[in-house]
Image: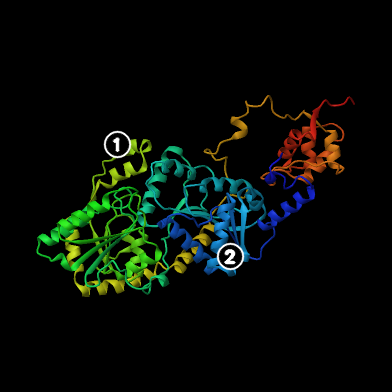
């Protein structure tokens, strides 16, 4: 028995044709009266709350609220991600829902050929941006800009992923978007190293920060958290409680210890850690014991939801984030603190220095590393990510004495209040509507950069497997120009509507039943493959359709009749 999911188009070829027409229409084969934006990603994900997920969802919501495009085309790999996107659109931007087209990834070639896209933007630059550029160069009607954003940059395998960007078909309209100046430096260094080896063009690198919805942090969300005392100065550390993926909190406790040794009464201070600890980790308990030994009240709030996180943020007097791990690139929690009007003590590390104006909106703590980690780089591809990230992070020292001095400064209420006001003002420059404006300017600028004519955009991508070439030895032989084809009795029956072809779900973009009918007419008498190709006039689906017909006994190879 054929599974139900495979019988959708078996009974009536007209159903197949109508479905094809619907897919092509939904995909943008019609000419829209305005620019069309495309992507390969849903931008919304389920599961645990992570900065990357929050940022991607924020971008999409802001794009829909600005609504600068006539259509939004999402080419997704599966139905489940499409369902999540549909629910998101209904909840945050119902007025845009009619403009959103959710399409199978297999519809890409036809859509690129028939739609003038303004730009494609990907939620991660490392997964498929270079391969999309290769398909664009070969199949698209215009060389549109392709951008993709960075998140974490430190994983050992990412060197291989960056290599997809460095190839002969890269154009001036291809751009990696780094979220911080430090992240942009990382990307440029990685691309430069690859360029020296591969001797190929490099994509552009631009800096567009992540955004924040300032309106969501402008006022307290509900009452103060019951576990946090009202009478104390609260230092809040939001984010993952992990030295493996975020920050080592030991320097913070040592800095408080220095304060006590210098005569500061820690009885008026409370330290709150709010985030996800590593599964099964004993670190929160260890930190609680260390705090108790120095007379500091420490409260751990495990896995707070969004409402609890915002309530804690508004109750806090100071936010502390001492990232020392290269997995951090931007620092969304620091930006959220600024939006809530909170001064920040942050490590002078990675993207944090883009988000804190030292002495005005907060204080930066000096960091130091050795740079001698080549042994880690060599071993990293063979280790778990958490292992080498811990090694790299432990090679970054936060200045404990300087941190203690910053904590002392923040004990002054007037300092906290003035810095908090300045932080809220700074956050306005990162509000999502403004960030979307930066993206629109970037896409417009990239769109007028020099680029080759469509269809002339360089060679095949060197990292894409050439299946036709590498698997040439698998079959007995390959269809040749002199091979003769003729329709079978079953083929005749199908043409007359007396029988029906079997078309598996997923083949809609690969074969063409209208072309099948033409082939059945052309091959009523034996015809060579070379002549058949001439009759089809370059139809890109001919080879796939003919092979499917041979497989289904609608065609057969035959000897050419004597003239």
Residue at point 59%, 67% (across, down): 96
Q: Is residue 446 left or right of residue 389?
A: right
First in sequence: mark 1 vs mark 2? 2
From this viewpoint, which residue is outermost toward the right?
563
Residue 254: x %, y % from top left? 17, 55
Above or below 521: residue 205 = below
Q: Quadrant of residue 34?
A: bottom right
Above or below 329: residue 134 = above
Q: Which residue is mark 2?
A: 69
The quarter of the image holding the C terminus is: top right
Q: Quadrant of residue 352?
A: bottom left
Residue 470: x %, y % from top left? 59, 30
Alpha carbons under labels 1 and 2: distance apart: 49 Å
Q: Nearer the viewer, residue 27 or 229?
A: 229
Q: Looking at the image, what colour scheme do you see?
A: rainbow
Give the SS element for disc 1.
helix
Residue at point 38%, 37% (across, down): 381
Q: Nearer the viewer, residue 478 or 98?
A: 98
Q: Is residue 351 left or right of residue 1?
A: left
Give the SS element for disc 2.
loop
The numbered dot on residue 375 is 1
Above or below 410: residue 377 = above
Q: Is residue 510 left or right of residue 318?
A: right
Above or below 277: residue 262 = below
**Residue 364 shows in the view:** yes
């Amino acid at each position: 028995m054929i599974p139900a999911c495979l019988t959708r188009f078996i009974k009536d070829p007209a159903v197949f044709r109508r479905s094809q027409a619907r897919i092509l229409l939904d995909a943008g084969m019609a000419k829209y009266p305005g620019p069309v934006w495309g992507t390969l990603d849903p931008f919304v994900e389920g599961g645990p709350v992570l900065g990357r997920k929050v940022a991607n969802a924020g971008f999409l919501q802001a794009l829909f609220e600005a609504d600068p495009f006539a259509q939004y085309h999402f080419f997704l790999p599966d139905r489940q991600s499409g369902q999540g996107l549909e629910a998101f659109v209904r909840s945050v931007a119902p007025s845009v829902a009619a403009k959103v087209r959710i399409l199978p990834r297999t519809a890409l070639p036809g859509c690129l050929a028939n739609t003038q896209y303004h730009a494609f933007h990907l939620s991660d630059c490392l997964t498929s941006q270079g391969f999309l550029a290769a398909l664009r160069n070969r199949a698209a009607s215009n060389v549109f800009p392709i951008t993709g954003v960075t998140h974490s940059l430190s994983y050992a395998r990412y060197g291989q992923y960056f290599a997809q960007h460095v190839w002969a078909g890269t154009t001036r309209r291809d751009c990696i978007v780094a979220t911080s100046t430090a992240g942009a430096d990382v990307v440029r260094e990685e691309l430069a190293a690859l360029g020296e080896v591969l001797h190929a063009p490099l994509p552009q690198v631009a800096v567009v920060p992540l955004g924040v919805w300032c309106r969501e942090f402008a006022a307290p969300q509900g009452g103060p958290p019951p576990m946090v005392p009202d009478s104390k100065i609260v230092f809040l550390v939001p984010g993952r409680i992990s030295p493996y993926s975020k920050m080592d909190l030991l320097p913070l406790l040592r800095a408080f210890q220095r304060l006590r040794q210098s005569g500061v009464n820690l009885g008026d201070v409370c330290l709150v850690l709010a985030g996800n600890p590593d599964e099964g980790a004993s670190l929160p308990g260890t930190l609680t014991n260390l705090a108790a030994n120095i007379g500091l009240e420490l409260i751990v709030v495990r896995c707070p939801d969004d409402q609890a996180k915002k309530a804690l943020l508004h109750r806090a007097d100071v936010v502390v984030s001492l990232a020392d791990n290269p997995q951090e690139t931007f620092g969304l929690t620091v930006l959220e603190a600024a939006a809530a009007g909170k001064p920040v003590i942050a490590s002078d590390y990675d993207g944090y220095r883009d988000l804190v104006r030292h002495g005005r909106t907060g204080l930066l703590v000096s960091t130091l590393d050795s740079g001698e980690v080549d042994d880690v780089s060599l071993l990293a591809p063979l280790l778990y990510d958490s292992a080498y990230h811990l090694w790299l992070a432990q090679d970054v020292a936060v200045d404990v004495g300087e941190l203690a001095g910053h904590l002392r400064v923040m004990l002054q209420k007037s300092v906290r209040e003035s810095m908090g006001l300045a932080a809220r003002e700074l956050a306005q420059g990162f509000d999502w509507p403004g960030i979307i404006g930066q993206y629109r300017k970037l896409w417009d600028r990239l769109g007028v950069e020099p680029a080759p004519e469509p269809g002339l955009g360089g060679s095949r991508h060197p990292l894409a497997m050439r299946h036709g070439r590498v698997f040439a030895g698998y079959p007995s032989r390959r269809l040749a120009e002199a091979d003769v084809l003729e329709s079978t009795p079953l083929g005749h029956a199908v043409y007359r509507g007396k029988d029906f072809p079997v078309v598996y779900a997923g083949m809609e973009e690969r074969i063409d039943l209208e072309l099948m009918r033409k082939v059945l007419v052309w091959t009523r008498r034996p015809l060579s493959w070379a002549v058949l190709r001439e009759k089809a006039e370059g139809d890109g689906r001919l080879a796939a359709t003919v092979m499917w017909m041979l497989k289904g006994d609608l065609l057969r190879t035959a000897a050419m009749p004597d003239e």
